[in-house]
Amino acid sequence: MSRIVAPLLAGLVGLAVVIGVGVGVAIPAAERAVVAALEWALDEPAQHADTSGIPTEPDEDFGEVQVYDVLADASLEPAASGTAAEVWQLFVRMVGADAAGESIIQYRAGDAPDSDTLAYVYQDADPQYWTLAVNLAVADDPQLLVATLIHEYAHVLSFDDGEFVTDAACPTLALVEGCAADDSYLWTFYDTFWAGYPDAVDVENLDPDLAWQFYETYEEDFVSDYAATNLGEDLAESFMTYVIEDSADGPTVAAQKLRFFDRYPELEALREHIRTELAVELGLR
C-alpha cells in the first residue's frame, strides 16, 4: 500500500520556492496568499455545514474524518454537503468525472487546522483504486487547495497500477509498488533526471534531513525543497508547478523537469484543462 503525504509546512514553503526559482511566470501574489493561508490555518477554526449522519473514522493526520464512497459517476455516497462537497466538486472539475470515478474509490474529509498535513492519497487493496483525503482547514485558500490537489493527483497518475509490471529481474526501477514499466512516467523521469546523481537520496526516501542535504547540494535542480524528498515527490511537485506556472523557460534542471511533461499529450491536455476550468481559483483571470 502506498501512502503519500504532502506536509502543510513543506507544501507552503515548497510553493513559495517554486515561485522563486525562476522557472516561469509567478502566479500573482502567490507568496502572500501562502502566508495568509498559514496564518488562517493556525489561528481560525473552520466553519462547515452540519455533518450529522455522515460516517466518520479516526485519522492519524486529521483526528477524525468524514468517509464517503466514490461511485463510478464520481458522485458520493452518502451525499456530501458544505465544504466537504465543495472540495470534492473542485477535484472532479479538475480531473473530470470519468477520471475521478475510475481512480478514486473513497474520499475522506477532515478539518484539522493544527495538522501539518494538507492532503494525502493511498492505494486501495485493489491497486487500481485510490483514497483521497483532504484537510478542509485549507479550503478557504483556493489557490493553495488546487495546487495541493494537483500534487496528489500526480501521485495517482504516476503510481497507477498500469505504470508497473510483474518482472522479477526488474531492469528499470524496483519500488514498493513493483517494477516500473519502461515507458512509465516514474522510470522516464528517473532516467532523465535522477540516474546521473552520484549521491542522490534513495528514490523512496522519507527522511527530511537527508532530503534537505540533497536539496542544498542541487538546489537549482528542484522546484522546491520538498521535491528533493524522493523521486515520487519530485515528479509530483514538478507536475504541480508545470500546471500552475505560465511557462518553463530557462536552462536549469528544474525548468527542464517542467518541459518534461510536454512530451506526453495527455498531460499537456490535462494542464490546459485545469488552467481553463480552474482559472479563477488559480488566479489566472
Image (cartoon, rainbow, N blue to C red):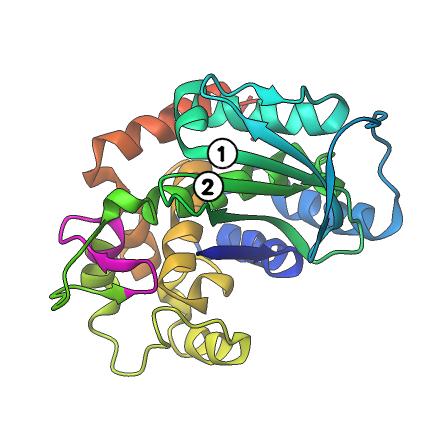
Position of the C terminus, as image quadrant, is: top right
Position of the N terminus, as image quadrant, is: bottom left
Residue 136 badge:
none
Q: Position of residue 121 (x, y in %)?
A: 51, 47
Q: Which residues are magenta?
A: 175-187
Q: Alpha carbon of mark 1 to alpha carbon of mark 2: how far?
A: 6 Å
In the figure, 157 relative to 235: above or below? above
Residue indicated by mark 1:
105
Q: Is residue 44 toward the left or the right of residue 236 in the image?
A: right
Residue indicated by mark 2:
130
User: Are the two marked residues, 1 and 2, in contact with CB atoms closer than 8 angstroms?
Assistant: yes
In the figure, 74 relative to 144: above or below? above
Write down the quadrant of residue 177 in the picture. bottom left
Q: Is residue 278 visible?
A: no
Residue at horizontal 30%, vertical 46%? 161
Q: Nearer the viewer, residue 17 or 116?
A: 116
Q: Position of residue 33 (x, y in %)?
A: 69, 42
The magenta stretch spans residue 176? yes
Q: Is residue 43 visible?
A: yes
Q: Secondary structure at mark 1?
A: strand
Q: Nearer the viewer, residue 125 or 15?
A: 125
Q: Position of residue 191 (x, y in %)?
A: 18, 62
